[in-house]
Image (tube, coloured by chain):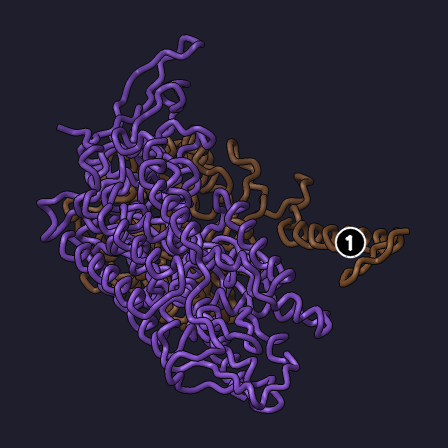
Amino acid sequence: MTEPVEGRVATDRREFLRRLGSAALATGGASAAAGYLLSRPEPSAQADGLPTFGDYSSPAAPSDAGLVTAQMTDHRAAVRAAIQGLGGISRFVGRQDVVFIKPNVGFDRPPWVGATTSPEVVAEVVTLCRQAGASRVLVADYSINDPAGCFARSGIGQAATHAGADVLLPREQDFERVGIGGHRLRTWPAYYHPLRTYGVTRVIGLPTAKQHARSVVSGAMKNWYGLLGGPRSLLHQDLDTVLVDLCAMMKPTLIVMDATRLLVRNGPTGGSRADVKTAHRIIAGTDQVAMDTLTAEWLGQDPTKIPWLAMAEKRGLGTMTYTSTLRRV
Amino acid sequence: MIRKVRIIWQVFFLVLFFALLYAATQLRMAGWPVAVAAWVDPLIGIVTTAAEARLDALVRLACVIGVIAAGVLALGPGKPSRLRNRLAGLIVLGAAVAFLTGSEIDFHRPLAMGLGVIVVTFFLGRAFCGWMCPFGTIHHFVGWLGNLRRSRQEKLAVADYRRFFVLKYYVLVAVLVAAVFGVQQAGLLDPIALLTRSAGTTVLPALDAAGVSAGGDAYRRWAWFPQAHYVRGVWLIGGVFVALLLANLWIPRFFCKTLCPLGALLGIVSGLSPFRHRRRAETCTDCRLCEAVCPSAAEPARKLRISECIVCFNCSDACPRGAIRFGPAGGPHAHERTAPDMSRRGLLAAAAVGFSAWPLGRLIDAHRARPDERAIRPPGALGEEAFLAACIKCGLCLRACPTGVIQPAGDQAGAEGLWTPVMDYKLGYCEYNCTACGQACPTGAIRELTLDQKQGRGEFAANGPVRLGAAFVNRGRCLPWSTLTPCVVCQEVCPVSPKAIYLERVQVVDRQGQTRWVQRPWVDPGLCIGCGICSHKCPVTDSPGIYVTAINATRDTKQRLVL
């Protein structure tokens, strides 16, 4: 035994063990807490147990309405007219429906660039859904640029909120693996979380018409790309098949194509006024193949040279010969 | 009573500091003065201004020698006299005038706010340390926690002045001398820069991670941080921070007493203050209650050390007989020490350390002749030399960046440039329509740009866009070039119009003998702005098929690439 030094507490074996024990507990506890905070529950891996996007089509929707186009300088009126041409919003959205709207908000760009869906088109569709009695309208996109910036600069965040929608900004942890069952996309991490947690019953796509170096056209099918997470830049290796898989992934309620501006070159980002052609046009419909075929023509492209359109038609997802059912209002 | 007022002030400024830091993390800060804590910090103002000044090396040397001579004169040998102090003061003044008139100074105006703190300190002593400094408040609190378990005897023991507390004055001397030679190192230990850097890279991200886990959707709706949180080298920044916090359990306000160069600066200024604490020896019973609660080792029951006192009013509040009061000084007093107890030898050594940062910090690195390819700076950053002189490594740009591309430098910018911001395109990319970093920067190391200026539009069309570097295709790893696999992701995301990446459509024969078409990317360096989104989004994620280096950056003529 050593004599206790004045002003110091003598440390004996018991004290030493006690301190060692509490230090170990403290470090262990902190590590465990950190581990708990940092780890997220992994989604269960069983393939057949995966959630899937389903059929969001409305039973009241007209079965053979085809495409309706409207051309007006008042873009909100054009949206109303095109949807009216399909029988009105009430045939698609009913009371107590929870509507998920997917505009193209891929880039941090002002509206005039034409890289994102026009805010007035988003606002009008949200307003119509609200008028039809939807209990909740959600607007989301997993942007390529920083989401907060995309929703702010494109004007979509403010327009949608103003019209009565909730804007969701996806984060990486909101994605979970879903069963897609496509030829290339069998399963993939997707932004499915809000569809489940909010009990979404209707899904509306609001693509915008753009040129694209790989897929030639970025339209209704390419728009669903914004629901995918994970290493999605790998998908460009077989983009044709992936686009068709996305078309088959779910049955959306309605698609409203924003062709008020056509981004004819330097797509899908644009950035110069010279890249944009003003068209004041809207297409409404449910056939994505027909809609993308028409969009391709408007963009000055030859649809017969776009492989994924033919592939989608062959899979029975729609028709490239839209002319017989096309109506202009 | 007044102690409670002080605590309310401290909490107020601490909350304000974190509120502004949080505001900096919100995209497009909409004109919030997020850098105000750094602006009111006079050390940052002085060091940045001195380091940025362009003047002859001989004038620098003369100034430094003059100031050191003044210090030596004031410190001895022999008994200090009023005459010698005045003479020393005159020399310092002369050196400052020579420095200011002989140099070309690009003064960043908001930094003038630091004068306010100097004036307050001149009249009231180190009230900034005791009442406002957010880092001081954190140390104060942790030190107070550590004292809870101590007896009065133990409290007295840890409250004692120790000889090594003089170190902070030497830190200050080294930092100032280095600054006169154009080397900016205030940010390493300046409390505002240190806390901003530590809180921005460790505290806030940790709170956010906890909030996301525990708070779920409700948290995300109201308080979430839009940025990515991964910070390279955060272990070092966070480690220093945690170590400094823990040191308070040993000695309360350890950092403030031992290391803080701002506290040292204000300590020297406070020696002149006409208002200070006063102990009336005739009423004092030498109970030393005041010393047990003194957080700054000012030894109020003995000869009060004015340069250490942070005017916290703990002593006067604790005195049961009202023997300590704050009031007019009324001339020199036997019961106080106004000057820090620096030694001549220590002063010379500290000056030598500061001076050596000038040649040593630069000899080691070849950066100035041939810039490091990884020293890619945020948009609006000054040329490398001016940038290093102005940047205080506070990391506010890093917090303001929406994509997380700005990271604290390890070795990319030399010894001098530790923790200065560099772009890491693996972690993010520069957002085309964003100038948040320049809005956040407190010292103008990153100039605030308008979008037109950054993109070279409108009245800035003739200047062209601000380029951070240039992209190069690594044909050995690019999918279409090396594996005949279609891709185009880099071209797709390129934000300039016309796109700086263009595609060559080529027919290739694969190993099965099938003819296929691939689109191979090429870069036009005349259009590329070096934003790095191509590299960040490249599907070859570990070592991308397209990468950006600092060459062709507009901020430095040494980096010119295109004829």
- The amino acid at mark 1 is Leu
How many marks the image carries: the answer is 1
At mark 1, the secondary structure is helix
Residue under the image location 41 percent in, 29 percent down: B544
Residue B393 horizontal side relative to residue B195, left or right: left
Comparing A164 with B429, the one in front is B429
Q: Chain of mark 1?
A: A
In percent of width and height, residue A229 lies at 49, 44
In percent of width and height, residue A42 lies at 65, 46
Residue under the image location 76 percent in, 63 percent down: A7
Looking at the image, residue A191 lies above or below residue B537: below
In percent of width and height, residue A68 lies at 30, 54
- Regarding residue A129, the answer to whether it shows in the image is no
Residue under the image location 29 percent in, 37 percent down: A212
- Quarter of the image that includes the N terminus of chain B: bottom right
Q: Mark 1 = which residue?
A: A25
Q: Residue furthest front?
A: B78
In percent of width and height, residue A53 lies at 55, 49
Q: In this structure image, what is the colour of chain A?
A: brown
Residue B146 horizontal side relative to residue B303, left or right: right
Quarter holding residue B169: bottom left
Q: In this structure image, what is the colour of chain B?
A: purple
Residue B12 horizontal side relative to residue B356, left or right: right
- Quarter of the image that includes the C terminus of chain B: top left
How packed is label 1: few (under 14 Cα within 10 Å), some, or many (20 or more)?
few
